[in-house]
Image: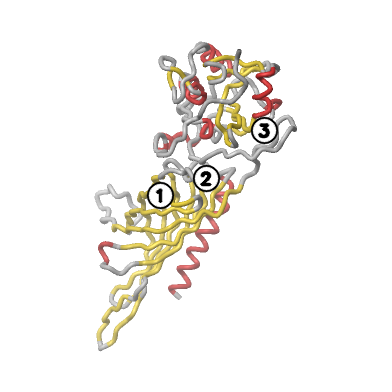
Amino acid sequence: MQRSSSFSVAALSVAIAVPFASGAAQQSDLAISPFVSFLPSAGSNPLAGLALTLAGDAGFGIRASAHMALENYNDDIGFGTSNAFRPWGADADAILSIGGRAFGGTTRGIAPFVFAGIGTASTDTNGFRQMHKNWSFGAGLAIPLASALDVFGESRWRMSRYVLPTASFAPSPTQEIRAGFTLHFGRSSSGSPGTTRGSRDRRVESGPTLGIPMMLPMGSSAPSSRRVLSTADDYVGVPYRYGGTSPSTGFDCSGFVQYVFAKQGVQLPRTARQQAQVGQALAPDWRAVSAGDLVMFEESGRIGHVAIYAGHNRIIHSTASGGGVRYDDLNTQRGEWFMDHLVAARRVMPDSRGLMIDLAHGFSSDVQLDGPDHAPRVR
């Protein structure tokens, strides 16, 4: 009866987690994680378990897990009898992946994560089975081994009562160490970049989904296109520099976009592929974009260049083929290259998840900078 209860708790956790996470994110990553848990205070008897996680693009996810001891505990209850008992437990956790977990790429970085949740566990005291409801919190680290496989380790502190750990009457939390593997099964999405100008169908690698939404100060609104374009115009003529992020040394394409929006109080990720994951997605069609929107272009089968649409069929960007920050007219022969290579567009919008972004910023360990664009050179 006790074991069937554990699977009932896990099933209920999954039933709650799946629809919630599905509605919370436009894209989701489904993952299964076999693991082993160790309780330092309970001796050497390990517990084996399985977790199901559904995570969205913002790095937020929900995880349901259940575990059971690999060996029986044998309690001597007197009269020459021994009562064998195998402890088990189940948890439902909310997880924030700091830096996110990307699926479908080989250049994913190490991703720290934090979590908190509720759980239940069985214990045996003098031969009496008892159920304990609890809450727990912890942190861990996921390290990619392959395109769909991670290894992870985490430490959990479990409270036996629903009180804050800092409360004067709070019991001491018990520590649990967990290690295992995570297998990512795939991403679901409501849409993906299609064709531009009806000319051809490109399969473009957008790169890791780092879970870094647009960072805006609390209570702020999206910056106006007039202010964005006015700021961008101030830097026309600044030379192109690979990896450049300031007007004193030069800009690459994404460094220029990041700098301009930072002047408006908006923190964007570093590269064009990362910037293609934030804000509001627009159709990769020039008829769908407005002044101030970000437009991304294909370079060698992946997103490798970004510009700001300036309206009136013009873009402003830092371009290697153009020598630096400049406007390009899309109606020219050079502009046709950008017309044909548009693969993504984003609109800078306020994001309610900004409260958690300070944790996520700067934890990506594998950032591939944007290279020079291959548009026809300015003569």
**Type of the residue with mark 1:** Ile
Measured in 3D between alpha carbons, the distance from the residue under mark 3 to the one under mark 2, in whole angstroms, is 23 Å
Q: Nearer the viewer, residue 134 or 105?
A: 105
Q: Tell me whether circle 2 and circle 1 mark residues in contact (CB < 8 Å).
A: no
Name the residue type under label 3: Ala
In the image, taking residue 201 as reference, residue 185 lies left or right, namely left
Q: Residue at x 62, y 16 (%)?
A: 328
Q: Which mark is residue 283?
A: 3
For marks 3 and 1, give the CA distance: 33 Å
Q: Residue at x 24, y 49 (%)?
A: 168
Checking the image for residue 143, the label placed there is 1
Q: Residues within 10 Å of mark 2 (few under 14, many from 20)?
A: some
Residue 124 in the image, given as x and y percentages of width and height:
32, 73
- Mark number displayed over residue 175: none
Name the image quarter holding the C terminus: top right
Instruction: Please rate how many residues cluster around mark 3, counting C-alpha atoms within 10 Å: few if below 14, some from 14 to 19, many from 20.
Output: some
Which residue, given by chain and number where applicable, does mark 2 sit on? 105
Residue located 26% across and 81% down the image: 76
- Residue 143 relative to residue 12: left or right: left
